[in-house]
Image: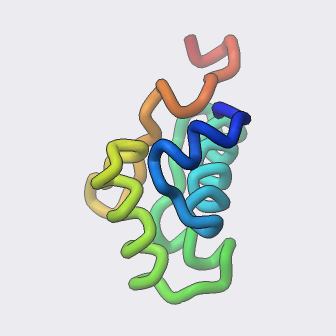
Amino acid sequence: MANDISFYTSYQLTPMQVDILRFVATYAIDHRGNSPGVAEVAKHFKIAWSTAYWHLSTLSHKRLVELRDSKIIVEKSVWEPPDYLE
């Protein structure tokens, strides 16, 4: 994932959205490309499912993730997959 602050400011991300995006990308890397569901995000951050869904919907509107049936698809441009996924 991009590390410089301009990435986050250009998308106008809140600190929570940055944390969620990092979690989702790291989860996808650690789980061989499988992204977490909304429930996993909610559990990880100890927030309500609806709050997690709201943050993910916002990230989806910004085209940083895609939501499909409560599963999250991370756009490849946002994170760098390990070699075994390429």
Asked whether, in this view, residue 21 is left or right of residue 73, the answer is right
Q: Is residue 1 above or below residue 24?
A: above
Relative depth, front residue between 49 and 57: 57
What residue is rendered at 27% in x and 59% in y?
A: 69
Relative depth, front residue between 62 and 68: 62
What residue is rendered at 59% in x and 18% in y?
A: 85
- Percent from the top left, x then y, of residue 50? 40, 84
- Percent from the top left, x then y, of residue 10? 48, 43
Asked whether, in this view, residue 46 is left or right of residue 76, the answer is right
**Location of residue 46 by image quarter:** bottom right
**Location of residue 31 by image quarter:** top right
Q: Is residue 46 above or below residue 63?
A: below
The quadrant the C terminus occupies is top right
Q: Is residue 25 above or below residue 15?
A: above
Relative depth, front residue between 71 and 24: 24
The quadrant the N terminus occupies is top right
Q: How many marks?
A: 0
* Residue sticking out furthest to the bottom: 48
Q: Is residue 85 above or below residue 71?
A: above
